[in-house]
Amino acid sequence: MSDGSEPKSTGCLVVSGMPGAGKSTVAPLVAARYPRAAHISGDVLSYMVVQGRVGFAGEPAEESRRQLRLCVRNMCALADNFAADDILPIVEYPIDSPELLEFMVGLLRTAPVMFVVLAPPLEVCRERNAARPVRERVDFDYGPQYRAMRERLGGVGWWLDNSDRTPVETADLIAAHARDRARVTSRADHRVPRTAGGV
């Protein structure tokens, strides 16, 4: 931190956002700003399924949802294991609905849960995605997902437009203020937007 102080290392920090928002670049930089922290990438866990993997929006749809739930369970189990040994988990994954956030919060034992959404404009996300190496690009239209996420999760946690900030500046800001701006639960308060649907 620029003032020489160290951010607290309790709880779980979730870094979300659309493809191209900067999650995979910013999340490890955030982790590096804490005295003890671990970066948990949902994509890395997802690709541990070597045979039979079905990604987001893949087919069959039910298998895609099943593997999504498995990925979230694995992220939460790792997060709790790190937190139990006083290592702050920084979870990086596109949590894009109240149902998915509820599911994650319900699994996590550690608290508080801090939810940061990297939220540059859609056109910025698309430009960044197009600039990636071909094998790393997301190859489906996530415009509808982007708009639905803003409509259904807007105002939950801390939505941070990082379009005019460098990754380092974004990481500094998150480490300095996530505990005040991004908290969605504490030990005594597990309230997130309630919905009738499921993951």
Image (cartoon, rainbow, N blue to C red):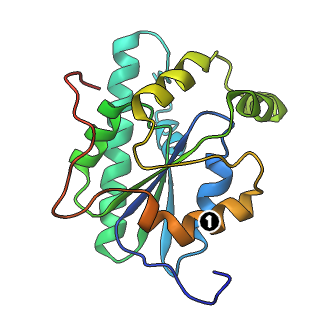
* Name of the residue lying farthest toward the top: 60
Residue 121 can be seen in this image: yes
State the residue lying farthest toward the front. Answer: 155
Mark 1 element type: helix
Q: Amino acid at mark 1?
A: Leu
Please tell me in which quadrant of the rendered image residue 175 appears. Answer: bottom right
Q: Is residue 1 above or below residue 94?
A: below
Q: What percent of the width, then of the height, locates residue 172?
A: 65, 69
Q: Residue at x 24, y 24 (%)?
A: 198
Figure check: 151 above or below 82: above
Q: Quadrant of the C terminus?
A: top left
The residue under the point 37% across, 67% down is 82
Q: What residue is at 75 percent from the left and 31 percent from the top? A: 129
Task: Where is residue 89? Give x, y as percent.
Answer: 43, 63
Expressed as whole percent of the image width and height from the top left, the position of residue 66 reads 32, 24
**For this view, does 2 lie left or right of residue 17?**
right
Q: Farthest residue toward the left?
A: 188
Left or right of residue 58, residue 188 in this image: left
The residue wearing badge 1 is 173
How many numbered marks are there?
1
Residue 29 makes an appearance in the image? no
Badge 1: residue crowd in 10 Å (few <14, some 14–19, many ≥20): some
| In front of the other: 86 or 67 | 86
Residue at 84% from the left image edge and 34% from the top image edge: 131
Along the line of sight, the residue nearer the viewer: 4 or 19 = 4
- Left or right of residue 12: residue 38: right
The N terminus, quarter of image: bottom right
